[in-house]
Amino acid sequence: MSISASQVKELREISGAGMMDCKAALTETNGDMEAAVDWLRAKGISKADKKAGRTAAEGLVGVATNGKKSVVVEVNSETDFVARNDAFQDIVRNVATVALGTDGSTAAVAAATYPSTGKPVVDTIKDAVGTIGENLSFRRSAALSVSEGVVATYIHNAVSDNLGKLGVLVAIETAGNAEAANAFGRQVAMHVAATNPLALTAAEVDPAAVEREKAVFTESARQSGKPDNIIEKMVEGRLRKFYEEVVLLSQAFVINPDLTVEAALKDAEKAIGAPAKITAFARFALGEGIEKEETDFAAEVAAAVKK
């Protein structure tokens, strides 16, 4: 099959590899972008582990909490200009508050009654399109709760109270001091915002992701020419490193890189005054996973002039 220049450009942006290497990778993998990234990694040409999600939608992520339960929601707009609009910010803040009264699932929040309109959240947002002047949508939500302890929240680069482009929840089960647990939980939430772990524990990492990494590590190790038993040990070592990089409890804590998050939690128990356990986390980055339609602004203007 023929490989287009746009495919080569996209792979270069993802991997940082040279043009000819990207073209070779796409040719070898019949244009499969993800397989091409793996091909480059196996050859030692690229260290990219996955296609970076291109932020397509604008809007805001919002959080709300009552201490033992917290929620995070995402509401999208077409432009960042609207995301800075007070009316839009009020909508996102209200949706987060409404979400606290539900199980936090996207379907439940969408169907929940919006306070000032008496209509479902999803219908209220549709109605707001006319007044705000661009397409809006409620995209998703999540909730975490604990029977004892706290669910800490964090908004990175907040544009207003509890609103921003990236929101994190961290649940900590403990019978100890809630204020101390919340302070540590917020630090862990900041860590999650920075490192974007795949899972809380090694057992929770998607088996497909592990197999993919194993295949890449094995192919890369084979190129060393070493015997199979040595290759197996090399792959085991690389997988251990992989878990250290993507599992929250095993990651080096950004606040104190000399400790893992798990070790930092043990240390924090002194201030909390009781055993504590991180039971879950949720991280919403605005627009992640939505592909943005790229437009040529100059061409649009030229076309408009010709009409």
Image (cartoon, helix red, strand yellow):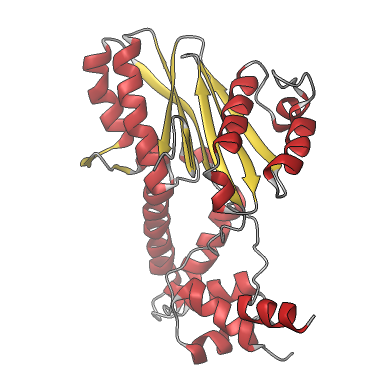
Image spot of residue 26 (x, y percent): 62, 83
Splitting the image into 4 quarters, where does residue 156 fall? Answer: top left
Q: Is residue 129 above or below residue 237?
A: above
Between 257 and 228, the residue placed more toward the observer is: 257
Quadrant where the C terminus sits is: bottom right
Identify the residue at horizontal 64%, vertical 71% (top origin): 294
Q: Is residue 181 above or below residue 281?
A: above
Image spot of residue 232 (x, y percent): 44, 63
| Left or right of residue 213, residue 140 in this image | right
Splitting the image into 4 quarters, where does residue 223 fall? Answer: bottom left
Image spot of residue 113 (x, y percent): 75, 20
Image spot of residue 229 (x, y percent): 42, 66
Identify the residue at horizontal 53%, vertical 62% (top origin): 52
Splitting the image into 4 quarters, where does residue 7 fall? Answer: bottom right
Q: Is residue 266 above or below residue 66?
A: below
| Left or right of residue 141, residue 62 in this image | left
